[in-house]
Image (cartoon, helix red, strand yellow):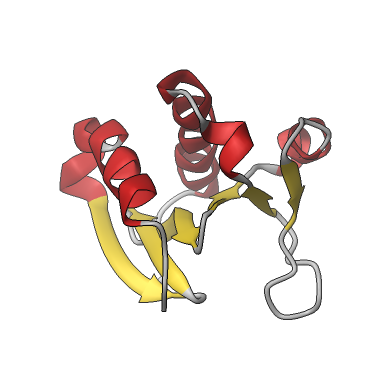
Amino acid sequence: MAYDELLVKRVRNILIPYHKHIEEKKMMGGLCFMYKGKMSCGVEKEDLIVRVIDSKYKVSLAKPHCREMDFTGKVLSGFLYVDREGILTEKQLRSWLELGIEFVDKQGPKRK
């Protein structure tokens, strides 16, 4: 499972305010960040993976350097890939990570 360690460090730094609720797991071919027990974002190779609520999915997908996540050969609903050029600045990366946090917050508590 190879993933961009520098991007992982950048993600970690931005997620510091949420650290009590963040857990890292190796999955989906990379490293995923679980927020309140649910995946909010991750890093696969050089791409950011982010989960987006339905009402913001199409708008987010239309942004430059963003594409549907088709990890299994089939598009995964609510998941997007953002390539390196779409997350060059901290502001860009932060905006994507905030979408992932929003996704989890809108889902409610994790079922047991």
Q: Is residue 75 above or below residue 14?
A: below
Say which quarter of the image contains residue 11: top left
Q: Name which residue lies at 64% across and 44% down.
A: 52
Instruction: Name the image quarter holding the N terminus.
Output: bottom left
Q: Name which residue lies at 51% across and 75% down.
A: 28
List the single residue furthest toward the top: 91
Horizontal placement of 82 versus 89: left or right? right
Say which quarter of the image contains residue 96: top right
Instruction: Name the image quarter holding the C terminus.
Output: bottom left
Q: Name which residue lies at 53% across and 25% down.
A: 92
Say which quarter of the image contains residue 37: bottom left
Q: Name which residue lies at 29% across and 37% down.
A: 15
Q: Is residue 96 above or below residue 67?
A: above
Q: Residue 34, image x and y in percent? A: 36, 58
Q: Residue 17, image x and y in percent? A: 21, 31
Mark yes or no: residue 112 visible.
no
